[in-house]
Image (spheres, rainbow, N blue to C red):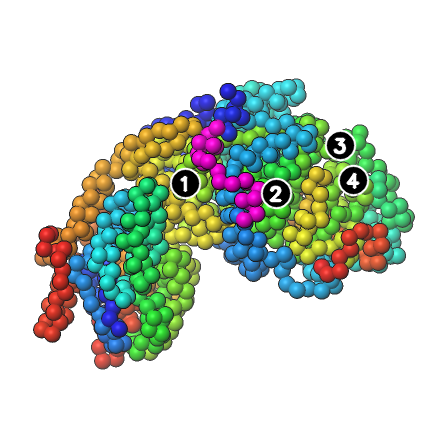
Amino acid sequence: MSGMPDRASGKAPGHTSGKTPGRTPGGTFVGMPAFPRAAHDAVRDPTLRANLRHATRTIRDRRAKAVAELDDWDRLREAGKQIKDHTLRHLGHYLEQLEAAVTAAGGTVHWAADADEANRIVTGLVEATGEREVVKVKSMATQEIGLNEALEAAGIRAYETDLAELIVQLGEDRPSHILVPAIHRNRAEIRDIFRSRMARWGRPAPEGLTDTPAELAEAARLHLREKFLRAKVGISGANFMVAETGTLVVVESEGNGRMCLTLPETLISVVGIEKTVPTWRDLEVFLQTLPRSSTAERMNPYTSTWTGTADGDGPRAFHLVLLDNGRTDTLADEVGRQALRCIRCSACLNVCPVYERAGGHAYGSVYPGPIGAVLSPQLRGTASAIDASLPYASSLCGACYEVCPVAIDIPEVLVHLRERVVQGGEFTRHGAKVTLKPAGGHAAERAAMRAAGLVFAHPGLLRAGQRLAARTRRAHPRTLPGPGRAWSATRDLPAVPAEPFRDWWRRTQEGPGRPERTDGREAGA
Amino acid sequence: MRIALFLTCVNDTLYPGTGRAVVKLLTRLGVEVDFPAAQTCCGQAHYNTGYRHQAEPLARHFSDVFGAYEAVVTPSGSCAAMVRELYPRLGERARAEGRGEALARVLAPVVPKTYELTEFLVDVLGVTDVGAYFPHTVTYHPTCHGLRSLGLGDRPERLLAAVRGLTLAELPGAEECCGFGGTFAVKNADVSAAMGADKVRGAESTGAEVLCAADNSCLMHLGGTMTRLRTAMRPVHIAEILAATEEEPWS
Amino acid sequence: MSSRDIVLGRIARALGPAPGEPYDAYEAAVDRGYADRHGDLTVEQTVDLLAANLADYRALVHRTEETGLPELLARLLAARGARAVLVPPGLPPGWLAAADAVRVPDLAGSTPAELDRADSVVTGCALAVAETGTIVLDGSPDQGRRRITLVPDHHVCVVRVPGQVVASVPRALRRLDPLRPLTWISGPSATSDIELDRVEGVHGPRTLEVVLVEGADRACAGTITRG
């Protein structure tokens, strides 16, 4: 059960725009630099900035319109939150119910405590079919566990069939967005990848391929069709699992999901345990909120639901792999567990000003953006440099919380995780209680916070400090040395005024007739 | 009506002009303003950086200083949000840590009566025309805490629209964060600066002379960015605009 | 210890004792105060909304009386140049009476490559959702196996109106059987993967034609009086 290495080296190779640092089957992006260093380069990459700005702004406005069509949006959001909270509160019960229903419908249920175990189970199931290749529907869970790499190590080739995943796979790139993993690529870059790489994986790109989206989509259709038609094993995730009926739901756009779910003889679905909902009826909430939040559509082009196996229609064998991999650790944290409500719509990424400028790769995880900043440090722990830096990758502006269709208070969880980083304390890792020490690198900050706390507890000290600053104000530089340079490299400091407000008040407002209020605390300062 | 001014540690130290403007404005509107000298800091920076336990004594101190007043008014959206939104959470967390109701009880009185300035003007005093005069083109940046935590809505714009001589220019991408974010400005300085620069360029594109907001923390970041980008615009707190009159113009 | 026990044990420790019976708690836990449908539309308006939303997502919408259906289907297939059309086993025999294309039956033994040689497919549906412009297939005899509406590039779907039209997603779920494999289709295959902008036509049928047929409701149980 050592699937998720806790420690990635804090000493990272230089940042890697366009290159792929090694990924372990454990799913950690080994050697990812901490967020600020990765973002440093992204901010200075004009193509990346333009691509992200264009894409996120397009979808942002459309999402707002799609949501505004429903006058009961707030109630749907609240209901979605309640359904998920209730399910999480009784997760064991619903998983057992789900298992029974899937089994009764002809499916086989497997449990995986961590990434390694899930990879072993899936690899074994594919090997048992005798096949050496599989087609895959885009799935965050299989990315998280590094399934493709594990299959490759066993000599099995996994073909990603989602257009964006295909772009990432062909380009030997990393995903940078939950919904649109190749969002960092513009159409011209996609055309170049198709032209230069498709032939290596199968049918080459058509002669004279241009960068119009319709032609690029056609090229992907032709390239993947031969793979779909001969595939014997399909691998998917799922958006929802209905406990009472054993029904799985995949929400998609292109039809590659339908191909993988219906044409192969064997279907293997790897799904995080938190994807459970209690009843069929619960889908009435999420099938309204998910498409509008993610692709800004009233409904996505295709939604497939299936319950076990069906006679003569679709796969003859169905395997469900229920994945923990840090989810139960997340569940153990009363504040942090709300991150498990996430339905992976990616609305929070699309509105996030930090994501727009830092790009998805800076988050060092298959879960980028605001939700990634609260999910990755919980699923993986905060021991690595990247995971310890993620809770700070936010200005706490709250735009993510505002658009979240299951009302995850991401700023609240971010602050809570900052506390975990700087204070340490007791948390759950791999199902066991551990006591974390405060993270290194925060000593100066801790001292500053303590000093500020002392000053603020004693108004007299505050006033003395203000007066000292006012008296020496002409000597203050407008730029700072040391850590303060982080501010003054790009921004001037405000001038210190000649007189703090409290002195002005005392001088002008507390003259005769305006007796000074008693101020007992100050005496002790 | 008698209120306590919670000026905030940042304004007290760096932006006393904003404090003087609030006093002038509220006095003009018939409000008696007190400035309890024992006030210091609401604890926001501690809380948001992960030092919740060190924010607690500051919150208790705030409650001690302001608990007896009818209303507390502050010219800072983020500090108002700290009290209104996060003080109750401090109490909840203390309860969850097995420390009982004590903290929640101490903090409860100040939560409902702490107002951000524009909210106090519009909701409590019921005014939008405060008799101000400000003959400049202004663009307004709604700060995140004001917009999303407090739900100030169009209150600030309504106040500005009623100012004589003032032309209000719509800020493109107004609802997007300016990139300050407290310690974020230093911990993620590159992203913070990029956000600030985009905000300043957006403001510049309106042709306004003044970028106005209801929070000097954001304006400190944006003002510092403006001088570095050599823009001619000036950052001005909304209190200073609302306090300005023909007789005593803003300077 | 099995992994099942490990995971369930971790959950139990993470949560502590759960209060009450889960299902009873569930009823109380969720406020269902959201709308059962949006807007107070007449039956006719609901069908119009379906047509408008289908068209908005680039489905080609046709309306006809039942008597005109065979002519219309023949025309649609001919216009497409369809030589081979996949036919589910329970498609009403009259529907394709006027069409020239070769009928290819939906057989369990057909390989995907064989299906790929068909130009078009004609099916009925389980229901259609007006607010979202969605048709839902449930594998009934007039719809066939899931793959026959997937592999051909041209899908013609017949919806009986108003009987098969529901206003909203909640109403659709109540009428569907979760134990059947369901396919919800909203417009032709599309992608938002290039610069987050929607482009029609990837792996599923790139042309979706929906025929709204009036006067064919007699055979349909559970006809609704208001959308």
SS of the residue under disc 2? loop
Q: CA distance from mark 2 to mark 3?
A: 24 Å
**Residue receiving disc 1:** A334
Say whether disc 1 or disc 3 marks the residue closer to the N-terminus: 3
Please report, as a chain letter, where disc 4 is located.
C
User: Is residue B72 in sight in this rendering?
Assistant: yes
**Residue receiving disc 2:** A279
Q: Which residues are magenta?
A: C9-28
SS of the residue under disc 3? loop
> What amino acid does circle 4 point to?
Gly
* Most foreground residue, A409 or A434: A434
* Magenta residue check for A256: no
Are dots 4 and 3 on a single chain?
no
**Residue receiving disc 4:** C144
User: Is residue A292 in sight in this rendering?
Assistant: no
Q: CA distance from mark 1 to mark 4?
A: 48 Å
Say whether disc 2 or disc 3 marks the residue closer to the N-terminus: 2
Are dots 2 and 1 on a single chain?
yes
Please report, as a chain letter, where disc 1 is located.
A
SS of the residue under disc 1? loop
> What amino acid does circle 3 point to?
Asp
> What amino acid does circle 2 point to?
Thr
- The answer to whether the residues at label 2 and label 1 have Cβ atoms under 8 Å apart is no
- The answer to whether the residues at label 1 and label 4 have Cβ atoms under 8 Å apart is no
Are dots 2 and 4 on a single chain?
no
Q: Which mark is in front, 4 or 3?
A: 3
Which secondary structure class fits the magenta region best?
Answer: helix
**Residue receiving disc 3:** A311
